[in-house]
């Protein structure tokens, strides 16, 4: 019986419309975009899909939650500007990201700056701009305090807390156990006691437990433990808890067998948990920080087939894209066992003429693998390969200069 069991499939890819059996991005055909790109592979992002994702989440999100966009997922200025108008704030991780965020015209107090190794430029830019600096260590607190005194400013800060709980279901674990992120929860009261309240406006905490979680019960557990931890630590603050970033962690379905996250029970449970801590949170802005959940589905990565060949029974489609453009699609960005992202032939989405193929890039390494043994419409030289779920951690999370091939382009529509 096991031999008849059907292999798991990718979740249906319905975000992008088609016309004449060809994918559209913002109403523009991928063939037209490919003409604009010339001989280069490219990313294409659809702003309407991002808007829809935010609106769909807002429909379930507790009204008292401030929704922030985590720019590290996709810092393209056009994307950031679009989401700045849809969310309540932005979260940055470098001076360069901060400059993009400030260019949107957003209130600096609606920007937070996190990261375990902020440079002098990072801190000087953040202090001058007046954004919330998430302190990762006593050493960083000393550096920010010195800058505050030099500039004659009182700098808004929050403390990054490494929680004393661990959720095993997160794709990337950012809390619990030993971590480079933040200060261990048990050390927070002593840390707070050392801070200079004349130089630092101590707002609250940033408690981030992990990302890319597709288990509603795991996320609900994390929210409960996060609020419980904040309640334990709040008495050590010099004043009321005014700002609490509870992270995000909402996952998206990249791989076969994964299904879209049902956020309704998660948000209903979060609303109940917030009510339980009503007295604690009376003066608190509670922030949910999301990146990939808002943008991953809204992006495509597209490359052109430049060669087609058969090697000992395997048909290879060789393209002008690959690892140097999109590290995570090759399985080299956190995967233990490589799995295929959802892929299609973008200019021939549906066809009865199908074949198993392996799609690779032009680099002379076996790691340059876009799709392995996938059944796709028969494709030839000049056809376009599209990788879905490519709006997050694609362009900027890849080694563009590896082997010195041309970099990809980006389009926002």
Image (spheres, rainbow, N blue to C red):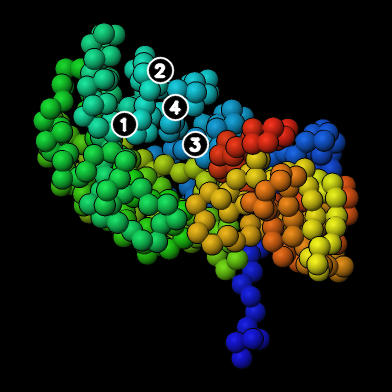
Decide if residue 2 is on the left or right side of residue 303.
Answer: left
State whether residue 189 is above or below residue 209.
Answer: above
Distance, label 2 to label 1, CA atoms, is: 15 Å
Crowding at label 2, few (<14), some or many (≥20) Cα neighbours within 10 Å?
few
Distance, label 4 to label 1, CA atoms, is: 12 Å
State whether residue 302 is above or below residue 201.
Answer: below
Label 1 residue SS:
strand
The residue under the point 85% across, 55% down is 308
Distance, label 2 to label 4, CA atoms, is: 9 Å
Of residue 131 and residue 381, the one placed in the foreground of this image is 381
* Marks 4, 1: nearer the viewer: 4
Residue tagged 4: 94
Quarter of the picture containing the N terminus is: bottom right
Quarter of the picture containing the C terminus is: top right
Residue tagged 2: 121
Task: Find residue 72 and name its label.
Answer: 3
Task: Find residue 134 and name its label.
Answer: 1
State whether residue 286 is above or below residue 335.
Answer: above
Is tag 3's residue or tag 1's residue first in the polypeptide sequence? 3
* Marks 2, 1: nearer the viewer: 2
Q: Position of residue 205 (x, y in %)?
A: 26, 38
Label 4 residue SS:
loop
């Amino acid at each position: 019986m096991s031999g008849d069991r059907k292999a798991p499939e990718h979740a249906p890819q319905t975000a992008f419309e088609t016309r004449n059996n060809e994918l559209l991005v913002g109403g523009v055909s991928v063939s037209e975009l490919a003409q604009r790109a010339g001989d280069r592979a490219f990313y294409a992002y659809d702003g309407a899909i991002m808007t829809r994702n935010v609106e769909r989440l807002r429909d379930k999100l507790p009204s008292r939650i401030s929704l922030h966009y985590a720019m590290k997922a996709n810092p393209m200025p056009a994307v950031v500007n679009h989401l700045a108008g849809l969310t309540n704030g932005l979260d940055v991780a470098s001076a360069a990201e901060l400059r993009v965020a400030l260019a949107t015209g957003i209130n600096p107090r609606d920007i937070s700056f996190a990261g375990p190794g902020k440079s002098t430029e990072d801190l000087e830019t953040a202090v001058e701009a007046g954004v919330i600096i998430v302190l990762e260590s006593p050493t960083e607190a000393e550096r920010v305090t010195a800058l505050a005194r030099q500039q004659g400013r009182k700098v808004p800060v929050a403390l990054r807390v490494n929680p004393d709980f661990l959720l095993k279901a997160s794709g990337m674990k950012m809390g619990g156990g030993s971590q480079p992120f933040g200060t261990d929860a048990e050390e927070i009261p002593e840390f707070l006691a050392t801070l200079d309240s004349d130089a630092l406006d101590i707002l609250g905490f940033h408690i981030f437990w992990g990302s890319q979680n597709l288990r509603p019960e795991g996320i609900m557990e994390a929210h409960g433990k996060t609020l419980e931890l904040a309640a334990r630590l709040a008495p050590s603050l010099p004043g009321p808890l005014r700002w609490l970033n509870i992270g995000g962690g909402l996952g998206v379905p990249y791989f076969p067998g994964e299904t879209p996250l049902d956020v309704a029970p998660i948000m209903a449970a979060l609303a109940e948990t917030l009510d339980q801590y009503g007295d604690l949170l009376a003066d608190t802005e509670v922030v949910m920080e999301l990146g990939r959940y808002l943008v991953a589905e809204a992006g495509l990565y597209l490359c052109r087939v430049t060669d087609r060949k058969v090697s000992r029974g395997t048909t290879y489609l060789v393209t002008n894209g690959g690892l140097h453009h999109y590290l995570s699609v090759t399985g080299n960005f956190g995967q233990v066992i490589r799995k295929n992202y959802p892929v299609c032939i973008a200019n021939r989405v549906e066809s009865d003429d199908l074949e198993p193929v392996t799609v690779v890039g032009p680099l002379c390494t076996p790691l340059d693998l876009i799709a392995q043994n996938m059944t796709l419409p028969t494709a030839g030289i000049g056809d376009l390969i599209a990788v879905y779920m490519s709006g997050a951690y694609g362009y900027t999370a890849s080694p563009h200069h590896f082997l010195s091939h041309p970099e990809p382009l980006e389009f926002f529509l």
